[in-house]
């Protein structure tokens, strides 16, 4: 069995871009083979269980969580080109996130038709298929942040009678091609920092999600392996070295990484596996990473020894002043802190959950919390009221 785990560790190391030493250490203490897709198609949450929870809410509360007012759902032009500097299909992703939530929770026929119709058009037009020659790592990152909510939306509508078999198969084949091209075999150097930091976490969360849709265990395991690798990187205080070295945006990127790790943990939980309880030899754990973020928001001096490295500072050059822009709602009503909904929903009585709630309430943050890095309308999918 140890030899099998060794080979699996090496294969996953190549796939997700971690070093062989780290892979061997993870494989020695962690049996990845036991992680299998047990509920194909259920990515972030158990569908029937969540519908039952939502059915107990008054209609006004349900619509506040899961409905985004639309006079008319848009028909999106096809975006074929993927560039280094911007997210492709940003408004398309927004329709996927809001439409899928409304279709799932409210049985909103117009929203469902919008999701299905736009997915079919983009698949027929082979959207997101023209990659820039000699792409930078940011190109894959921008593609991944669009693909994640597309995959989640597809999983929520794919079995409905409104989705004809021919169109469903076309969309599935289109997503198969995209996931394969930007996932396993992607044209990107595993030695790059972006293959090992929050970019890598996002990338493998996308691959994991598609593995759940397709019932493919190796793709599902990439997310689990990445989660273990992240805990192995983590310092005992919960800080992630490749994120907190980012100058004034040290906390921005710590939070960025946490968002993808929470998504991975929730996808694993839906399949019956608890990653939240994992702890590395250095005491790295997801909860510790979240608590470090909360502590450093209150006292930014905690990350200054790491932030002064000023790796890729861009316009945020003064590491002494941390950027807290992630606590403010951004374009299209999206919010970088949407990952708090699943965490608080899973651990509502914990001190960490109370601190997260107090932080957002103190900043005037209101739901629904929607974000593509988390996969969609996280308030609709997870919030406890």
Image (tube, helix red, strand yellow):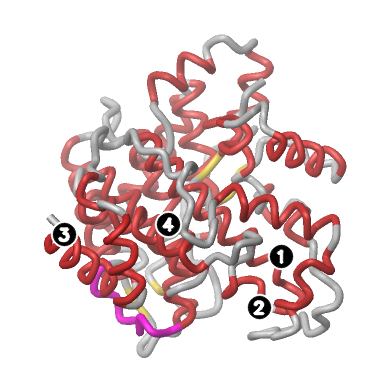
Mark 2 and mark 3 lie on one chain; the one further toward the N terminus is 3
- Whole-Å distance between the Cαs marked 2 and 4? 20 Å
Identified at 51% across, 21% down, the residue is 106
**Foreground disc of the pair 3, 4:** 3
Q: Main secondary structure of the magenta part?
A: loop
**Foreground disc of the pair 2, 3:** 3
- Whole-Å distance between the Cαs marked 3 and 4? 21 Å
In terms of image quadrants, where is residue 125?
A: bottom left
Cβ–Cβ under 8 Å for marks 2 and 4: no
Mark 3 and mark 4 lie on one chain; the one further toward the N terminus is 3
Residue 187: in magenta span: yes
Cβ–Cβ under 8 Å for marks 2 and 3: no
Identified at 65% across, 28% down, the residue is 348
Q: Which mark is residue 2?
A: 3
Q: Which mark is residue 251?
A: 1
Q: Where is the C terminus found, in terms of image quarters? A: top right
Identified at 74% across, 34% down, the residue is 354
Left or right of 312 in this view: 173: left
**Foreground disc of the pair 3, 1:** 3
* Residue 146: image location, x then y, percent: 46, 58
| Nearer the observer, 151 or 227 | 227
Cβ–Cβ under 8 Å for marks 3 and 1: no
Q: Residues within 10 Å of mark 2 (few under 14, many from 20)?
A: many
Q: Residues within 10 Å of mark 1 (few under 14, many from 20)?
A: many
Mark 1 and mark 2 lie on one chain; the one further toward the N terminus is 2
| Nearer the observer, 237 or 227 | 237
Residue under pointer 2: 245
Residue under pointer 4: 227
Disc 1 element? helix
* Residue 79: image location, x then y, percent: 42, 65
Q: Which residues are magenta?
A: 184-192
């Amino acid at each position: 069995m140890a030899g099998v785990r060794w080979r699996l560790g090496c294969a996953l190391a190549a796939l997700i871009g971690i070093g062989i030493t780290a892979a061997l250490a993870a494989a020695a203490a962690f049996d990845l083979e036991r992680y299998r897709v047990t509920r194909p198609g259920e990515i972030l949450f158990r569908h029937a269980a969540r519908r039952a929870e939502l059915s107990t809410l008054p209609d006004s509360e349900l619509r506040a969580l899961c409905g985004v007012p639309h006079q008319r759902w848009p028909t999106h032009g096809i975006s074929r080109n993927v560039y280094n500097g911007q997210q492709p299909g940003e408004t398309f992703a927004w329709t996927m996130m809001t439409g899928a939530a409304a279709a799932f929770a409210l049985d909103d026929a117009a929203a469902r038709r919008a999701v299905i119709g736009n997915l079919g058009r983009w698949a027929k037009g082979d959207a997101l298929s023209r990659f820039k020659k000699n792409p930078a790592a940011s190109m894959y990152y921008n593609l991944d942040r669009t693909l994640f909510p597309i995959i989640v939306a597809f999983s929520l509508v794919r079995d409905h009678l409104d989705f004809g078999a021919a169109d469903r198969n076309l969309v599935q084949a289109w997503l198969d091609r995209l996931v394969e091209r930007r996932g396993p075999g992607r044209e990107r150097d595993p030695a790059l920092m972006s293959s090992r930091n929050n970019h890598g976490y996002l990338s493998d969360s996308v691959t994991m999600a598609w593995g759940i849709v397709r019932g493919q265990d190796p793709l599902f395991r990439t997310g689990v392996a990445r989660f273990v690798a992240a805990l192995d990187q983590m310092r005992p205080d919960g800080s992630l070295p490749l994120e907190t070295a980012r100058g004034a945006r040290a906390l921005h990127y710590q939070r960025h990484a946490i968002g993808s790790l929470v998504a991975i943990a929730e996808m694993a939980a839906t399949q019956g596996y608890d990653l939240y309880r994992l702890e590395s030899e250095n005491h790295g754990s997801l909860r510790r990473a979240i608590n470090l973020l909360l502590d450093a928001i209150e006292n930014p001096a905690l990350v200054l020894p790491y932030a002064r490295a000023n790796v890729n500072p861009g316009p945020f050059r003064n590491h002494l002043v941390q950027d807290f822009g992630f606590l403010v709602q951004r374009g299209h009503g999206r919010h970088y802190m949407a990952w708090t909904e699943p965490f608080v929903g899973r651990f509502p009585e914990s001190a960490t959950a109370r601190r997260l709630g107090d932080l957002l309430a103190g900043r005037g943050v209101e739901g629904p919390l929607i974000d593509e890095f988390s996969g969609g309308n996280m308030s609709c999918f997870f919030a406890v009221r």
